[in-house]
Image: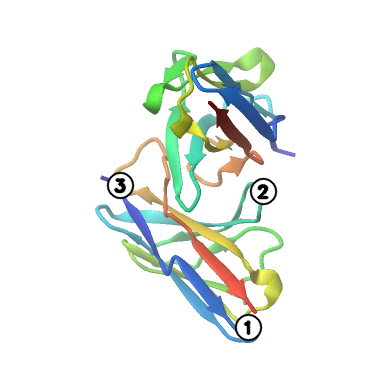
Amino acid sequence: GAVVSQHPSRVICKSGTSVKIECRSLDFQATTMFWYRQFPKKSLMLMATSNEGSKATYEQGVEKDKFLINHASLTLSTLTVTSAHPEDSSFYICSARPHWDTRYEQYFGPGTRLTVT
Amino acid sequence: AQSVTQPDIHITVSEGASLELRCNYSYGATPYLFWYVQSPGQGLQLLLKYFSGDTLVQGIKGFEAEFKRSQSSFNLRKPSVHWSDAAEYFCAVDFNQAGTALIFGKGTTLSVSS
């Protein structure tokens, strides 16, 4: 149980275009989902926290107009990278916290590799 | 500032040998502590966690970790490493004990030699 999927696993887009990444909790409802960014040989950096039905909370330094997060349902959150540039190329990972969890454990998706050319 | 330090960037261990990966965190209170493993192309898998109680916690795949409050450490151990353990290991801390942000260390790459 507690499986999180991400789609697509890899995406290549041209500079200036937008790309949407989906994060789904497959067998549980997630009241809270998190979006992380991982640079090569670096740790994960939290970008934002999204709660179902409310606006996402962005970490300091993350451009909310560039990284649009929508958590429209208890099983789906999306991250849209708008007007992507090569420096946005990275590995994006989402995680989800089950609504029944009392220990605040997060379950991670497999990640999405974004390459902006 | 809250931070998590994994002092070893890369460790190579012979198959069958013991392993210890170090993790230290800043801040005085007792946070929630996690160890995750990431294999190439895979998501993060939780190895074990500590919230309270017994300071020695057992996890999956034969891993264990010990919380030492006096040293602000949460080191991961395995008595006998298998080739399949080669991966990236991350220590993560929830400083607020509130299920909000996890602060990750930079990770330790484990290589296993035969």
Which of disc 1 and disc 3 is earlier in sequence?
3
Q: Is residue A109 above or below residue B72?
A: below
Whole-number angstrom distance, CA of label 2 to CA of label 3: 26 Å
Three-letter amino acid code at disc 3? Ala
Report the disc number at residue A42: 2
The answer to whether residue A34 is visible is no
The residue carrying mark 3 is A2
Please state the horizontal and vertical placement of residue A89, each as a whole percent of the image: 63, 69
Measured Cα–Cα span from mark 3 to mark 1: 33 Å
Chain containing the residue with disc 3: A
Can the viewer see residue B114 in this picture? yes
- Element under label 1? loop
Q: Which amino acid does the dot numbered 2 rest on?
A: Lys
What residue would you read off at disc 1?
A83
In depth, the one of A49 and A36 nearer the eye is A36
Please identify the residue farthest to the front as the structure is shown.
B114
- Screen quadrant of the N terminus of chain B: top right
Please report whichever mark, 2 or 3, sits nearer to the chain's N-terminal start. Answer: 3
Q: Residue furthest bottom?
A: A16
